[in-house]
Amino acid sequence: QVQLVESGGGLVHTGGSLRLSCAASGINFSDYDIGWYRQAPGQKRDLVVRITPGGRTNYGGSVAGRFSISRDNIKNIVYLQMNSLKPEDTAVYYCAYREFWGQGTQVTVSS
């Protein structure tokens, strides 16, 4: 059974940092891209960043230079380090692997 479990969300002030984790099980973790997406209220779900098995990254939107992704192919975990957070980063953040999605973790940035 495939499981993607996100953690690490929370409430932070503008300029703060958070690190999200996504623990994967039931998949061949190192075989495919894995990514982070986010969805703000009333908005569509958008790509934050995706990473290939070899470590190449593809950033969406306005997070490059503030966010970074990494993956541990031994522990089957992907991380999203978020720095210099802004109120517009407020959203539910989801981990995705192929057609599988986690349940999401809320990130709220207060001004």
Image (spheres, rainbow, N blue to C red):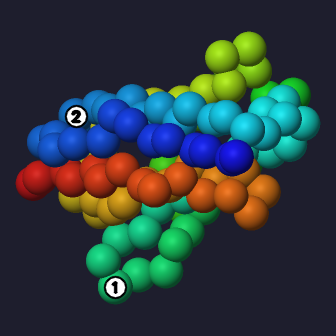
Q: Amino acid at mark 1?
A: Gly
User: Residue 34's spot in the image, x, y percent?
Assistant: 72, 44
- SS for dot 2: loop
User: Residue 42's spot in the image, x, y percent?
Assistant: 34, 85
Query: Is tag 2's residue or tag 1's residue first in the polypeptide sequence?
Result: 2
Q: Relative to the observer, which residue lies in front, 5 or 70?
A: 5
Instruction: Reply above or below: 80 against 58.
Output: above
Q: Relative to the observer, which residue lies in front, 77 or 54?
A: 77
Crowding at mark 1 (Cα within 10 Å: few <14, some 14-19, many 20+): few
Count of picture labels: 2
Q: Is residue 49 visible?
A: no
Q: Is residue 32 left or right of residue 75?
A: right
Depth-wise, is mark 2 or mark 1 nearer the camera?
1
Please name the residue shown 22% across and 34% down the image. Answer: 16
Dot label at residue 42: 1
- SS for dot 1: loop
Which of the 4 image quarters holds residue 13? Answer: top left
Decide: marks 2, 1 in contact (CB < 8 A)?
Answer: no
Q: Amino acid at mark 2?
A: Gly
Which residue is at the far front? 1
Please name the residue shown 78% across and 57% down the image. Answer: 98
Q: Is residue 75 visible?
A: yes
Instruction: Reply above or below: 16 against 110.
Output: above
Instruction: Reply above or below: 105 against 88.
Output: above
Dot label at residue 16: 2
Please name the residue shown 30% across and 77% down the image. Answer: 41
User: Residue 95's spot in the image, x, y percent?
Assistant: 56, 49
